[in-house]
Structure formats: structure tokens, C-alpha cells
Amino acid sequence: MKISICSFSFHRMLAAGEQDIFQYIKDCKQLGCTQLDPWNAHLAQLNHGADALHAGANPDQSQHLKAVDDEFLERVKLAADEAGLPFGCIAVDGAHIYEDSEEARNSNRQRAYRWIDIAEKLGASSIRIDSGGPSQWTEEVFDIVVEGYKDIIARAEKAGVKVVVENHWGPTVDPDNTVKLLKAVPGLGLLLDSWNWAHGKQADGWLKCAKYATATHIKTFRFTEDGQELTQNVPAFCKVLLENGFQGTWGVESVPADGNEIEGARKTIQLIQRSVS
């Protein structure tokens, strides 16, 4: 069974200085992961813990997540190799496709190129780039998003990296928008988040998008003493994925209400394992 933890699951530890990318690698190894799925804040030059918290709460305003240099990346790759953990999906904030101005779009595009380069250097299999844009696309905005994805996919393919979109924020929290985008962009994969849907759209999101999923973020927030998640039906989500032939990595993105991020990730892994066994 392939299992991973998106490092956003540890964003409060990152902000508090309790975990950096190297400790993340160690924690993933200890928790039984088979690959590494870093959020790009773990690979960014953070001046203050608040930078990570702001990025976590405002993915559409995360352009301040400036990537580390290549020398640092070499150390990261060595640490991952020593742990025996390959890099899977790098979840990138601050490089989304759509902004209102062409200047802002071009600036984001350059950041996307840099993160694709980083994914290649780390040997990551995929990279999440958000679509951006208003909650509902106009034809003009949609065309810009489609062409933007085609551009970064062409660049990523040369690097051996797959580009995925996530139902994360903006228009992609509507499952119909996500499906429309996936159908319009050859080669675009889907990082399917169990939780990030517009109000009342979760069931539609699972049923309409599961067949496109190449990776997952399984959200958890609150657990009972016997390990059940109270916020959403994780076993049902896993069943829908299995029924649609999901063969990817079961990715954890836990956000524990009690603040214990290590235990939140551990309990989520255990719940997924029970759900797919």
C-alpha cells in the first residue's frame, strides 16, 4: 500500500520551528510512509513562522514562498535517499495559473517553472499547480487557464514531472468546473481532496471526480477514541476511489483540531489502512 503525508499536515510545527524539511523526512519514515509529498512552504525560505501560517490560510496569496537554492536541494535529496523515500507530489502554492493582470500571470508562471525545476531535481513524480481564478469561469478566463496549463505541462513533461490540479480554492471547488478543466487539458492529472468542495458539493465531487484521481489528500479533523473521523466519512471516500480503480498513493492531509499534528497524521494513516484493507 502506497501512503504519504502532505507536509501541510505539519504546517503548525513548521511555523513553530519544530519541523523543517529534514525532520519532515524523518517523521514520514517513522510514520510508515512510502513517499514524500511536501507542501512547498517546507522547501521555501521562510523568514518568520507567520509566513507559513499565512500561506496555509491564503493559498491564493502565497507568492512569498521563495524556493530554496540548489545547494540546499541537494542536501534534501540526499536526506530523502538515505531514508529510502522518493518524492511524490509537491503541492505548490503561489504559482497558480490565473491572475487578473498579465504581469501577475507571468510572474506566477516563472514561479511555476522554478518549482518544476525543483521537482525534477528532487526526482518528484508530480507537482500541484492551482488554477486560480474567480469562483465561476468566464469563457475568457477559462481559455487563459487552459492555455496556461498546456504551457506548464509541456515544460514539466520534458522534466519527467506530471502536473496535477487540485480541488483546492476558487473555481475548482465546484466539481463541474474541475471535470471541465480535466477534459480540456490533455495530460493534466487530479489531486483529489476529500474535503475541499463548495457547500453541498462534496458528494458530487467524489462521484464525478474519483475516476480522474491520480493522487489524494484525505482530510481529517477530529477523531473519536476508537479512531473514527467525525467530520466526514473517510471509509466511504476510500470505497468510491477503489470502485473507480484508483491505483495511486493514499495521501494524508490531516488538520487536527487538538493541534497534535503527528498523532493526527498517524490516526489518519490507520483509518485509511482500515478503510482499504
Image (tube, rainbow, N blue to C red):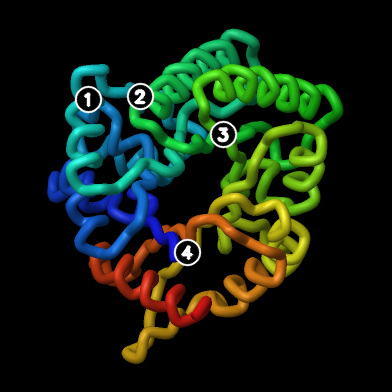
- How far separated are the C-alphas under marks 2 and 4? 29 Å
Numbered label attached to residue 219 = 4
How many numbered marks are there?
A: 4
Q: Amino acid at mark 3?
A: Lys
What residue did someone put label 1 on? 74
Cβ–Cβ below 8 Å for labels 2 and 3?
no
For the residue labelled by badge 3, is the local secondary structure a helix, a strand or a loop? strand
Residue at x 18%, y 52% (from the top left corner):
26
Reading the chain from its start, which is encountered first: label 2 or label 1? 1
Q: At x 64% / y 57%, what residue is drawn?
A: 197
Determine the CA span between mark 3 and mark 1: 21 Å
Foreground disc of the pair 1, 4: 1
Q: Which mark is residue 162?
A: 3
Q: Say whether residue 200 is visible.
A: no
In the rendered view, tell whether residue 261 sits above or below residue 136: below
Q: Pointer 2: what residue?
A: 121
Q: CA distance from mark 4 to mark 3?
A: 23 Å
Rounded to the nearest angstrom, the CA distance separating label 2 from label 1 is: 8 Å
Which of discs 2 and 4 lies nearer the camera? The answer is: 2
- Labels 2 and 4: the sequence-earlier one: 2
Question: Badge 1, how many Cα within 10 Å: few under 14, some, many 20+?
Answer: few
Camera-nearest residue between 168 and 127: 127
Q: Residue 178: percent from the left, percent from the top?
A: 73, 46
Closer to the N terminus: mark 1 or mark 4?
1
Neighbour tally class for label 4: few under 14, some 14-19, many 20 plus, Cα within 10 Å: many
**Mark 3 Cα-neighbour bin, 10 Å: few <14, some 14–19, many ≥20:** many
Which comes sooner in the sequence, label 2 or label 3? 2
Q: Which numbered disc, 3 or 1, marks the residue that appears first in the sequence?
A: 1
Amino acid found under the numbered disc labelled 2? Lys
